[in-house]
Amino acid sequence: MDFISVAYLGFLGILIVLYYLVPKNRQWILLLVFGIFFYSCFSLKMWIFLLFTAVTTYLYARFFCGSGRWLFMITAVNVLALFLLKLSASGLSFVNGLGLDRFAVLLPVGISFYTLQTIAYMTDVHKGRIEAQNNFLKYLLFITFFPQILQGPIPRYEELGSQLYEGRAYKTENLRDGAYLILWGFFQKMVIADRCNIVVNEIFGNYTGYDGLYFLIGGILYSLQLYTDFAGCVSIASGSAKMLGIELTQNFAHPYFALSIKDFWRRWHISLSRFLKDYIYIPLGGNRKGKLRKYSNLMLTFFISGIWHGIGTHFLIWGLLHGFYQVMGEVLLPVKKGLLKITGMEKGCFAHRFFSRLFTCFLVMTAWIFFRAESTSKAVYMVCHMFMKWNPWILFSGQLYALGMTEEEWLLLILCMILLIVIAVLHEKGIRIRESFAKQPLIFRWLILFAWIFVILIAGIYGPGYDSAQFIYGGF
Amino acid sequence: MKRWKALIKCIAFISIFVLLFLYVQELLRDKWAEGEYNVTTKVRGFYEEEENTLDVIFIGSSQMYADMAPAVLFHEYGITSYDFCANEQPMWISYYYIKEALKHQTPKVIVLDVFTVYGEDYEEEGVTHINLDDLPMSLNKIAAICDSVPAGMRYSFYFPLAKYHNTWTDFFEGKAELSFYHESDPYKGYSPFVFAADYEESAKPEVVNQRESEPIPERAGTWLRKIIDLCKEEGVPLVLTKTPNGNAERQKLYNSVSELAKETGTPFLNMNVLLDGQAHVNVLQAEKISMLMGEYLVSHYEFEDKRKDPAYAEWVQDAGLFYRQKAKCQLISARTFEEYIPLLADEDYIVCISAKNSKGQPFLGEDVNLLNDCLNLRCELDKNAEGTYCAVIDGGTVVYETATENQKAPEGSDEFTLETSGLNIWVASPGGLPDRSAYITVNGTDFSMDGDGLNIAVYDKVLGELFEMSVLDIGQEMKPVRKE
């Protein structure tokens, strides 16, 4: 059962009705039952891995939590299982040669997310930050809570656990806000991400037929696609949880408004960044052991981030590029200051922020090309050829329409980008759009809501021939 | 109180959403309302027929709606009928069309064309949409969707917006106008195919002599039997038929249908072995086929002649449209001057003539005489071959005629503009001047072939269209030459 389906909306609707009908102290059981059903819709085989992770981490937290050796062993076993399953699904030739590819079908949905989630849980119990959960079923609910199991956000036990077990009273505001979030998720995924996907597939799929500005457009649209796809999914997850009175952790904060790569990682996939920082970077020593050690820690953290996203040199290079960007950001700080002095630009002024954002976006976009390309050589080809041909006339000659989108669709996409920028600016200024919207008169709200719903229904990419299961981060 | 308020708001929101959804869905849905394959017009038109007024309902594919003209059955036998058909309609959809038809009509006979007995599996998605989208939502439609569409695709048939939403990029005014289409079809589901064709007097020998049989695929066979059973249950006589398509290979299947018909005691009128034809025959051949069907029906079943019944006065008018199409087909099929000219003397035509003779070839006296006799003209081109000549005949009456000797033509005398039957017509004849053109302009558009001979343009006042542009070519014995 995918988020983008009528079945999911039906599933959620039934759950919400039952959730507020049962006593509060029984609500968690309902969530568990529905979570088990939701996960079982993907494949029953996947339960083997999920239960293995759940049982081993539960047992550790319950009975061996003082032992660093057991923590290491259980973590290692789970990480190894994750690595091997990802390896089998990587499609690399040596994997196929070893016959490991036959296990690719077993790659469980959400394994990358719940593995990190349970590692964080064990570590926190080990460090005494949280109490271990005694009830296995309640612990299982923490792992299988359906809105976040597919693509996160990666929850912390201290943030999610109590919300799941306490029970929630009915509040109309929760239903309303949850519905807004779900609608926003549908809009991002169906209208923007899947529309970008048409052009991205064309350019990345037939890259030898394109050059110059085409690759820049491909890179920009892929950056937009990845963000709206992932943020859309998280928005649906957050909205679903919100309707049940449960707040999920924030996963995005307008990442393309970041002023630097360091800032980008404070805004992009926040729950993963926090995990990498708290459970890898800091335990490695963070910035406490000198500059050289700090830089190597950074590179190692992003190396792991690359592997977590997928097995393949292009994922590794993507991760290392981000590490490299951050290291260079620090190393070249004097140069940056010098440039500011030469240009007479004040730090923090509009022009400075504008160029910083533009430059950061460009760096991120270049790295995304490695992330999206199926091989390193393809990514290198695309990045190099982006600068080797000057062909801006494709913007005006109608050649863009040959990439699979009509003139009207390009116009729609541009309008959507403007909308995203406006929303981001308002958020950056601290304006809470949902709250402001809720204060408007009913007729105005309904007009906007109907317009919004029908934009999704009309301009969304769905229907016969469309595979809605392809949430990009669902594959990681 | 607060909860009740919330509930009322919720119901109001959902109700408005449903209404808007249905409206947008209908707006964006593809419609088939133009040209010969106008299934929307046919299917929606069927529901506009007054209840219990049809004697015969024809069910089947486009081969049925191209071949069976209810107008002929009414005009010749006083039988009211309707082609309740859609493109490549598989047997399993025909079954539900019959069920739908019986909800609104109590026909004396149902005639099913067995063209699609070849059906082995689900039809293509597009064909199924054409067949089902225009049926109003009902239990029959839901059952038809279940039996015609694979499970994973059914949602786009219940909610066609899922299929058609992406047509917003090419949304056009016509599509909006055709939304919520509820108009009766004057052709009663028939599609006039107007083109010139040569048909044999009877079916081709290879079709008639086809003795082999090919088994009917299980799926189509099962549904054909279901149709036979349904008609028996409903007490409506069923006649199986195959309109002539001239296909000897498919005749093998029809031989099997013949066996099935005998086995079940169902009459089978296989016109494929009686008349020549093709997938979609022209109007002239359709008239023959319809006559044959009419003869068969009146000789086997009893019908009340409704031609004189004032309640069916509109049918008389509607049937007239078929005969206009027939006249049109006859004219565009005429190949000689002698065949062509008499057909122009039709009271529903406006005929425009402009002469051109850049090479100074002679017009024959007998040709000019035929022209004058048939159309009441006073043309003298046989005596003055290079002179100018223009004429306009409206409903058999000459409304303007002018001729001059080319070299002496006073300014403007070789052309004229007039208003007749609401049309603005400008005709100009260059006569023998080689550097000038012949013009026949109707409402600002030139329809002249600008050839040597008599340039002709014909407008049908009933159909409201200018359908014929030709030149009676002086270099080719005045044969009508048309644009390719």
Image (tube, coloured by chain):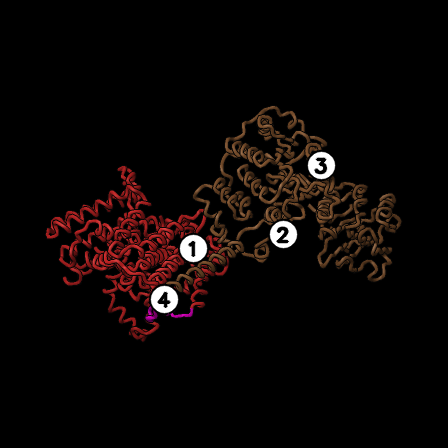
Chain colours: A red, B brown
Q: Of the residues shown, which amino acid type is indicated by label 4? A: Arg
According to the picture, the residue beneath numbered tag 4 turns out to be A434
Distance between the alpha carbons at the discs numbered 1 and 2: 38 Å
Q: Position of residue A173 (x, y in %)?
A: 34, 64
According to the picture, the residue beneath numbered tag 3 turns out to be B291
- Say left or right for B303 vs A307: right
Subunit of mark 4? A
Image point (34%, 55%), residue name: A17
- Secondary element under disc 3, as helix, strand or loop, is helix
10 Å neighbourhood of mark 1: few (<14), some, or many (≥20)?
many
- Secondary element under disc 2, as helix, strand or loop, is loop
- Secondary element under disc 4, as helix, strand or loop, is helix
Which segment is the magenta one? A421-441
According to the picture, the residue beneath numbered tag 2 turns out to be B183
State yes or no: discs 4 and 3 in contact (Cβ < 8 Å): no
Distance between the alpha carbons at the discs numbered 4 and 3: 71 Å
Q: Is residue A434 magenta?
A: yes
Distance between the alpha carbons at the discs numbered 3 and 2: 27 Å
Subunit of mark 3? B
